[in-house]
Amino acid sequence: MQGFTAALAAFVLLHVGVSATGLRGVLVARLGERVYRLVFALASAALLIWLCVEYAQLRADATDPLNEIIWTPPLWLRAIGYALIAFGMLSAVIGVLTRGPTFMGMENTVNDPDPVRGMLRITRHPFLWGVVFWAAGHLLVNGERFAPMLFGALGVMVLLGVRSIDRKGAARNPEGWARFEAATSSIPFAAIIQGRNSLKLGEIGWRALVAIIVLAGVGLGHRLLFGVAAFPGT
């Protein structure tokens, strides 16, 4: 329990306490943008691996207090949770495969003649909002004590990241970001509903197929990957 808690706290603090605060600017000034990004990426990967190892150990220990069932979600709530998880994973995978100004190393694409395509028409943060929906879905289907800690912390961390990226984008290129922001929305589908953009699924193309394959693979291999089946009774 202590190892899992420490790993989760360290992972969240790295992103909230460094990337989303003024400390990032201090480190960039001292290390340079490229070195900072490399160090941050390596630290994130190391902490994520630690978190995954601790989570696997937690789930394997039936006596760990964090595995205690504190509530049992009804079937209708599970259905909503599975839908959120599926949409979140699809959004995240498609987002990773979509070129856009909100991704590290692609900030200059905000100056492209047409920077808003595919999944960016739905939200300018497809990966991060995908994680939010994924976390929210797991909160609905998991009744264990660890669930609010893990999925709640990750969801809040990502929402703070969304705000941080928007602030940094506006500070980096006010004019270009203003044009990009005017044609997009952070909240999924908001720009489409408001008439500032339109849904063009054809632009997503092959990325949707890749996302479906990943979703199916994770669902079928959930027990092997995370020690518990994706669906009860499977």
Image (spheres, rainbow, N blue to C red):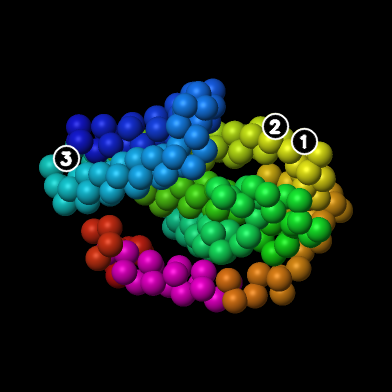
- As drawn, 232 above or below 19: below
Amino acid type for the residue under numbered disc 1: Pro
Q: What element carries label 2?
A: helix
Is residue 13 visible in the rendered image? The answer is yes
Q: Do the residues labelled 1 and 3 touch (CB within 8 Å)?
A: no
Residue denoted by label 2:
171
33 shown above or below 133: above
Q: In which quarter of the image is the N terminus?
A: top left
Give the residue pinned by disc 3: 64
Q: Distance between the residues labelled 1 and 3?
A: 50 Å
Q: Residue at x 69, y 36 (%)?
A: 172
Confirm whether residue 71 shows in the render: no
**Relative to the observer, which residue lies in front, 234 or 123?**
123
- Residue 145 lies, in percent from the top left, at 30, 38
Give the quadrant of residue 98: bottom right
Mark 2–mark 1 CB contact (< 8 Å): yes
Residue 174: assigned label: 1
Q: Distance between the residues labelled 2 and 1?
A: 6 Å
Provide residue 16's location: percent of width, then percent of height: 47, 30
Q: Give the range drawn in magenta.
A: 208-223
**Which one is in front in this view, the residue at disc 1 or the one at disc 3?**
1
Element at label 1: helix
Q: Which of these two is toward me, 117 or 43?
A: 43
- Residue 211 within the magenta-colored segment of the rendering: yes
The vertical placement of 73 against 15, above or below, is below
Prevalent SS, magenta region: helix
Q: Position of residue 177 (x, y in %)?
A: 75, 42
